[in-house]
Amino acid sequence: MKEIKKNGALLLALILFSAFVPKIGTVQAADKDKKPNVVATAEAVINAPINDVWAVLAEDWAGIGKWSSGVSHSQGFGEPIGGSDHTIRACEITAAGFDDTKEQILEYDAENHLIRYELADGLPGFVKDAINVWTLEETADGTLIKGKTTMRATGIMGGMMKGIIKGATRKALESMARELKHYVETGELHPDKIASNEKVAKKDARMRKKVVTVEVEQEIAAPVDKVWSIIGEDFAKISDSNPDCPHSEWAEGFDTAEVGAKRIMYMTDKRDNKYFVNEIAKYDPENHHITIEVVNKEGFPLNVEYTWVNMDAVEISKDKTLLKIRFNYLTKPRFLKGFAKGSMRKAFQKYAYGIDYHAKTGEVVDEEKWKEIKHLYK
């Protein structure tokens, strides 16, 4: 156990060191053609039919966070492939000092029970081409599961860390196989996963105390149902009232505002480098309340686990409504949270003004319209 902790601390220290010394381990163009120099494997026999194992490992590929102690939460994105609903999964990693990851399925072979996927995001700079392959075979005792990870550790840092990376990866594969076996055979979480969940829950309680809140209110000369239609029913049309969002749309598979529905907010015209994926966590039309969580993002230093917004439309009179916006967030890195508060307040106040104008006129408030009307809100 002491040796594992020692190796883990060294691994973390070197990864952090590499982040501040980017020139060490620079990969030359020719290096892209080199073969993997780190290979780790693990296997286990699971006392269950092969289809039962395949259902958890592959068909519910995006649900790895349900049973793996290495992942506190996971979520699927992208198109379906084979029996999996998603080709991409995002994983929140439990190990301290490691970034959250994104993985993408490269091959899904239900007939031969093989799934191959790459780690597309979350690797230190000196590690390239990380590929995981899991295969299942029927045996007299149930199902033999085999896992294999290959990757390239490059440059000086990679050379120094190759052995440690291999050992850590092998232990991670063994942990996955062991916890999958327990989960499939018993229908219950492995003790390591239970302990991990308890640790994550304690951390979550501490982190929520650090959440920063920004509150904005705007009195709008429009009926409450009109304001509600903008913030609630037209959830996916936020670009009609938010000048900072040039385009928005329903996420694939959703077309109605309800709990669980998702939208995509593109924050630039390019639609690929800055965006948010929002999910409705609470939806109460009767009381004109909606809670919206950020479940994915690109290009913003926000911790999506602790970023959400509450919006309320409160009737003042027949033709007057008070809009309340309460934005809760943590940044990543966390030290930015204080610096971000002013800009967050300005952004949500601008959004409130956009809702006000859109509710009263029906006009779309894009950036050009905002330049035209902003003098009205000084």
Image (spheres, grey):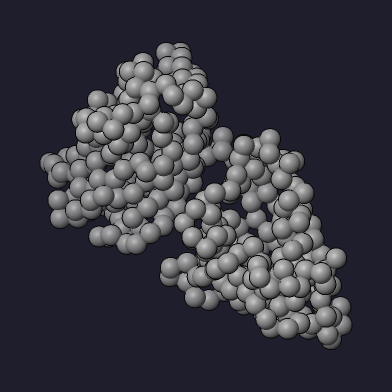
Which residue is rendered at x = 41% and y = 57% of the image?
77
Query: Residue placed at 19% from the left, 50% from the top?
Result: 113
Q: Is residue 251 shown left or right of residue 129?
A: right
Q: Position of residue 72 (x, y in %)?
A: 49, 42
- Out of 138 and 255, give the one closest to the viewer: 255
Q: Can residue 353 be seen in this view?
A: yes
Q: In this view, does 53 lie to the left or right of 74?
A: left
Q: Is residue 2 left or right of residue 208?
A: left
Residue 174, above or below 14: below
Image vertical order of residue 23 relative to residue 66, above or below = above
Outermost residue to the left = 140
Q: Where is residue 304 in the image (x, y as percent from the top left)?
A: 58, 49
Identify the image quadrant of residue 161.
top left
Q: How many marks can you see?
A: 0
Q: In which quarter of the image is residue 131?
A: top left
Considering only vertical position in the picture, is 57 above or below 123?
below
In which quadrant will I find the C terminus?
A: bottom right
Q: Nearer the viewer, residue 123 or 308?
A: 123
Q: In which quarter of the image is residue 25?
A: top left
Looking at the picture, tell me which residue is in the foreground, 101 or 30: 30
Give the x, y percent position of residue 332: 61, 40
- Residue shown at 58%/48% (left/top)? 300
The image quadrant where one finds the N terminus is: top left
Residue drawn 32% across the image and 26% down it: 153
Asked whether the viewer can see residue 165, the reply is no
Q: Position of residue 69 (x, y in %)?
A: 44, 37
